[in-house]
Image: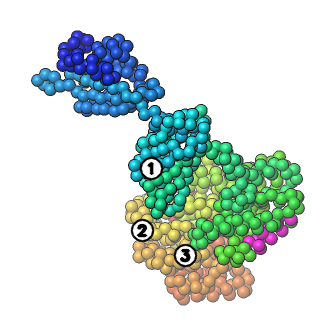
Amino acid sequence: MVEKNDQKKCRDISTEIQEILAKWGKYFFYYYPKEHRIRPSEFAARHMGIVENATDLEHSILMDRIMEKEKLLKLFQDIDHGAKTVSAKIQSSGKDMVYQISMGRIQSGSQKQPEYVLGLIEQIRADTRQNEIIQALGSNFNSVYYVDVDHDKVYAYKVNSAVRSVLNDTLKEIPGYEAIMAEYVGKVVLTEDRETMLYETSIENLRKQLSLKKAYQYDYRIVRDGKVKYCRAKFVNTSDGGQLHRMVAGFSDISSEKQRELERMAYVDSVTGGNNYESFKKKIRDFRQPGYLVSMDIHSFKIINSICGIIKGDETLKGIWKCIQEILEKGDLAGHINADRFVIYSSGKDQEKTIRQLQQLGTILAELSVRLKVPKLIPYFGVTKWKPDAKVEEVYSEANFAKNQIKDRKDISYQFYSHEDTIRMLEDKAMEDEFKHSLENNCFEVWYQPKYDPETERMVGAEGLIRWRDEKGNVIPPGKFIPLFERDGLIKVLDEYVFRKVCMQQLEWQKQGKEIIPVSINLSRASLYFDSVVSRYQQIADEIGVKTHLVPIEITESAAIDNDNIKGLADKFHDNGFPLLVDDFGSGYSSLATLNMKCFDTLKIDKSLIDYIGDFSGERLLEHTILLAKELGLCVTAEGVEREEQVDFLKQMKCDSIQGYYYSRPLPKEEFEKLLLTA
């Protein structure tokens, strides 16, 4: 069908014109978009030595003769998508030939529907000078070229004999600097370097760079013989007055130089000039003597970079490295890991020798701080034993672990690694990993410890305490997981969980018609630092439908003292109807100022003070504490009460409530409910 129609269509193109065009290397062809078939004209077939048949585009003779197949397919795709005319230069499979391919739609019939596309293919001999210059650049024969920037022309300036054999001595001028560079970059430069290379070598960038300095160079990578090679492009401004009118461009292969640099960089630290970690690991394998491996860090080193700048920071690191070298003895070794982290090998089994070296280093680093006028350099170290044939990474990991145990302390400068610490760390990690699962599966339970009025022996309140039950049904002691969760921030989630559980339980007891008493919950130090903590707890209470006075908030004395905003926070809690209790008063360093904060409603006296009962001086201290609290309008709750004589004394002191094993240990919900029934 296609072949018959062609005879009609060819009448529009005179035989005479086709013959003339064929002599000039120009041939017609027909493309049928609906069928994706292409057919050469009679003259094209005859002159190009091909069969005059319509074939699929993908399998046509045209595709066989084209190198840039994707570019050709894009041309036909544009026609398929409705373009009326298209044209492009496309590299042939022959080295020195380029095809100029143009196509246009032919409209036919009353409905103006395109029946076919008429194409013209023109053979153009490629600019061999441009190809030769690209070959020269790609071969990296240390070639140099003169560029006339104003007229956008490139001349071979200084070419060695190898390049001359490629360029031929007749090559005098190659036009189009950026066009040549674009083609060079596209053909030989490594894909990930192309975009940067095009910018770095652009006239726009070179004008900027060469206005600041006479010469500018840029290193990049090419692919040659299937291997990556390092190259350098260097540009020298030969114009007068700082403006860029003319320049010399040089291209050279620096692979050997780069390889030597890479080998050096692999083992030399770029900041200190000494051993890096790779070098340290390589060298210590040759040390056949037992010793100690030390991981070293500097407290708050980032402050130096922030306040004094990166340059001063690097100068300080160099100074630290020199100080480390001073304390090393024969057979010792050191390396710079990164930032302010260093590693030291102290030879020999003498632990005191290692400690002495670290103490000496601390002293000379303090002196260095004064000389450099930077904040005091305070090092801290993790130390572990080193044995020949040990794996460096594993031993360093031990030292690093020991160091991290004291990173938040300024009173201890070194810590020795112990296996028990590792076991504890693994247990902590396991608990952290299990936290979310346990929360979702209600493995956390709220237990209740009653508070009694010593005068009436009546239960007047309780404290909600968290308990964690593992998969085997065993209860994990709070002291094992609470400090961990306080360190890693999970305690905030747990605080909110307990508060929600207590609110829900209060609502349930209300619905059951049981006598309702306030159940206080503990708010951790970490939770206090969240601005929205009050509004969040108020929101939860409102959602569940519980009055806030039934869920008092307990805050430890130490947390209250450490929080500068405790007064403002307390006011917000009070404004929302939450009673506040200061917990653990007297458990550590206590101040009478705590009593005068005017933030709290109840003072909970810690067991450590209650245990003074029976001792004359201790009783006087406790007596005056209770009296002072009462005079300031505070209610008093005694915690940890276990003996009858303690109850008698507290009753005599008019203590408002007592909490402790004398009355009851913390109880699971089911057991506590039995007490509520008789309350």
Q: How crowded is mark 2: few (under 14 residues within 10 Å), some or many (20 or more)?
A: few
Secondary structure mostly seen in magenta is helix
Q: Which amino acid does label 1 sit on?
A: Asp
Q: Earlier in the sequence, mark 1 or mark 3?
A: 1
Callout 1–callout 2 Cβ contact below 8 Å: no
Q: Could you give the CA–CA distance between mark 1 and mark 2, rounded to whole angstroms?
A: 72 Å
Which mark is drawn over residue 563?
A: 3
Q: Using the rendered view, name the quadrant where residue 20 is placed.
A: top left
In the image, the segment drawn in magenta is 353-366
Q: Which of marks 2 and 3 is nearer the N terminus?
A: 2
Residue receiving disc 2: 535
Q: Nearer the viewer, mark 1 or mark 3?
A: 1
- Nearest the eye: 116 or 501: 116
Q: Residues within 10 Å of mark 1 (few under 14, many from 20)?
A: some
Q: Which amino acid does label 3 sit on?
A: Asn
Q: What residue type is labelled 2?
A: Ser
Residue receiving disc 1: 148
Count of marks, rendered view: 3
Give coordinates of residue 135: x percent, y percent: 52, 36
Q: Could you give the CA–CA distance between mark 1 and mark 3, rounded to whole angstroms?
A: 71 Å
Q: Nearer the viewer, mark 2 or mark 3?
A: 3
Give coordinates of residue 432: x percent, y percent: 60, 54
Q: Does the magenta stretch include residue 364?
A: yes
**Which residue is located at x 23 percent, y 16 percent?**
15
Q: Which of marks 1 and 2 is nearer the N terminus?
A: 1
Q: Nearer the viewer, mark 1 or mark 2?
A: 1
Looking at the image, residue 500 sits to the left or right of residue 229; the answer is left
Give coordinates of residue 631: x percent, y percent: 54, 89
**Which residue is located at x 64 percent, y 43 percent?**
255
